[in-house]
Image (cartoon, grey):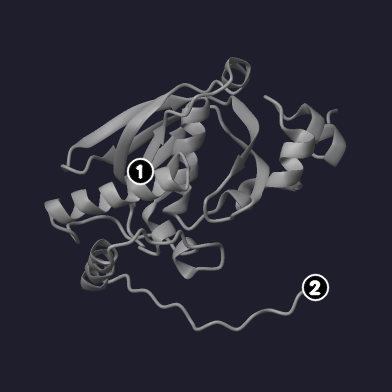
Amino acid sequence: MSEPSREPESNFSTDPQGIRDAVLALLDAGTLPPIVQAGHPALRQPAVEFDGQLSGPELERFIDLMRTVMHEAPGVGLAAPQLGIPLQVAVLEDLYPLDPEVAAARNRQPLEFFAVLNPMYRAVGTETAAFYEGCLSLNGLQAVVIRPAKVELDFRTPDGRAMQRTFEGWQARIVQHETDHLAGTLYIDKAELRSLSTNSEYAARWAEPGIGKAREGLGFLPGP
């Protein structure tokens, strides 16, 4: 076991002015902000609802910044707490090319870019799906998470409209993962921990459209 390192305490504010100041500091920095990693308090506390803490132009710039950071990572979603901002804002997009066999096994369809404010999801039906997933805030790790295969999402758009959309397959997984971030939940909280793998071990041993090899080799989700 390694000795814990000592770093300066990280502080962040949840009051409206503090949030606005933190966002403006990111926007004015001139460089892309780092994605905070597990252990940062912003990832473990419920984010506050968006309620006008930013003006329309400020929110638009912040969403553009989040999208750029997501693309640079690269990833298919990013929540504001991953930039250390405890605000219920997230961006989602999945347009990466994918092997047809993998796409079919995971029911992974292209997801056009959109941003959500104050999202909430609920399962539609009882069907679930189990696949590996990772997180930009837990660099280098993946684990299997069982999630509802279909969800209904209520959210507000950046221009304030109330929306409701239904997602299934991999799109539903992305929606749940990013919305969970805004509740202070990381995918590892819901994962089959025996499936936990580094990216390199996953690539060398378990990379396939499904999870059959990993399930047998690592001994998780045993059958009846």
- Estimate the spatial distance between the alpha carbons at disc 1 and disc 2, rounded to whole Å: 37 Å
Q: Measured from the top left, where is residue 40 in percent x and y? A: 50, 68
Q: Can you say which quadrant of the picture contains the C terminus?
A: top right
Q: Can you say which quadrant of the picture contains the N terminus?
A: bottom right
Instruction: Give the residue at x 54% y 27%.
Output: 149
Identity of the residue furthest to the front in this view: 30
Q: Tell me the number on the disc at residue 91.
A: 1
Instruction: Give the residue at x 27% y 64%.
Output: 23
Residue 115 sits in quarter: top left
Q: Are marks 1 and 2 in contact (CB under 8 Å)?
A: no
**What residue does disc 2 label?**
1
The residue tagged with tag 1: helix, strand or loop? strand
**Mark 2: which amino acid?**
Met
**Mark 1: which amino acid?**
Val
- Is the residue 10 above or below the residue 75 in the image? below
- Looking at the image, residue 58 sits to the left or right of residue 68; the answer is left
Report whether residue 120 is seen.
yes
Of 216 and 127, nearer the camera is 216
Figure label count: 2
Q: Measured from the top left, where is residue 69 in percent x and y? A: 38, 50
Instruction: Give the residue at x 51% y 34%.
Output: 173
Q: Residues within 10 Å of mark 1 (few under 14, many from 20)?
A: many
Report whether residue 219 is seen.
no
Q: Measured from the top left, where is residue 167 in percent x and y? A: 43, 26
- Is the residue 59 above or below the residue 155 in the image? below
Q: Residues within 10 Å of mark 2 (few under 14, many from 20)?
A: few
Q: Earlier in the sequence, mark 1 or mark 2?
A: 2
- Looking at the image, residue 22 sits to the left or right of residue 146; the answer is left
Q: Measured from the top left, where is residue 95 in percent x and y? A: 42, 28
